[in-house]
Amino acid sequence: MKRTVLLLAGATALIFLPHTVLAEDVMGLFISLKLNDAKSYQQWHDASRPTFKAHNCVPLRSGKLAGGKGTLQWGASDHFSLMKCQTPVLSDLVDRGFINSLSAITDELNLTEGNLEILSDKRPPPNSEYLIKISYFNNLNSKARQKGLSKIESHAKKAENAWIDDAILQPRSAVGVIQPDNLTFLYYSKIGQGEQFRKSNPDLMNKIGSFNQAHLEHFIYLPAQLKNRGMK
């Protein structure tokens, strides 16, 4: 528990940052759930594989979730998967009954689909501190939000031990949850780096906290342990 708290404290830096160069721009499907029966899930995965294949979907990131911190309640989901697809797949999964069948063998099932911007051309190290931020903007002042993000990005680029942006998902549809405005995926390359970053940059942490308070209706940081294959 102590390690998770420290990780989240360092994760306060996680925000949706402006970017200039994208490695890829495709569709993404984020799935989070509480996995009760690995065997049943594998059977579901095998049955749904042709549908995913038809949309040229491949796993991008997956692993275990370890709680969360923020103003948003995300239930007891303990596993996640981020799929990269060439075309939208969520409605097809719904029409073919795969979402109903998945909800019958899992709890806390949430799916979000949208434009996926892949920002890193490297796979995060196995022992990295991986983080997912789910955000709902209040949209009170979108121009001020973008200006604030630019200032934070400029500050962060000058800091040592900063996080690495992995991907951004801009949702277009959702099942099981009110559609978020943004999902951001990032990581620190090694354990303890997030805590060190937080301690070394208190001014930046304060700016990010003020940004969250001013521009986000709800948000949650989800720490994750990456796995090489599937939600097992």
Image: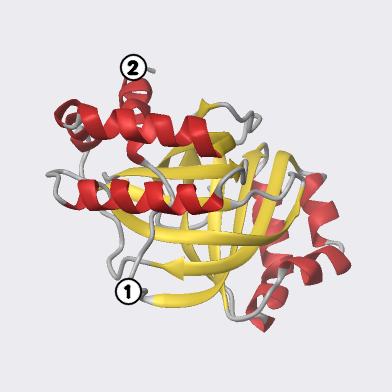
Q: Residue at x 33, y 17 (%)?
A: 2
Q: Residue at x 23, y 30 (%)?
A: 203
What is the quadrant of the N terminus in the image?
top left
> Which residue corresponds to mark 2?
2
Q: Earlier in the sequence, mark 1 or mark 2?
A: 2
Q: Amino acid at mark 1?
A: Val
* Image label count: 2
* Image spot of residue 146 (x, y percent): 44, 54
The reply, left or right, for residue 197 in relation to residue 96 is: left
* Image spot of residue 45 (x, y percent): 67, 61
The reply, left or right, for residue 111 in relation to residue 127 is: right
The reply, left or right, for residue 119 in relation to residue 230 is: left
The residue mark sitting in front, 1 or 2, is 1
* Image spot of residue 178 (x, y percent): 74, 45
Q: Residue at x 22, y 27 (%)?
A: 202
Q: Secondary structure at mark 1?
A: loop
- Residue 219 in view (yes/no): yes
Q: Nearer the viewer, residue 217 or 25?
A: 217
- Asked if marks 1 and 2 touch (Cβ < 8 Å), the reply is no
The reply, left or right, for residue 36 in relation to residue 23 is: right
* Image spot of residue 225 (x, y percent): 39, 42
> Which residue corresponds to mark 1?
21
Q: Amino acid at mark 2?
A: Lys
Q: Secondary structure at mark 2?
A: helix
In the figure, residue 210 lies in which quadrant? top left
- Residue 231 in view (yes/no): no
Q: Nearer the viewer, residue 160 or 190?
A: 160
Give the number of the disc on residue 34: none
Image: 120 above or below 53: above
Q: Residues within 10 Å of mark 2 (few under 14, many from 20)?
A: few
Q: Disc 1 and disc 2: Cα gap in Å?
A: 36 Å
Q: Nearer the viewer, residue 15 or 129?
A: 15
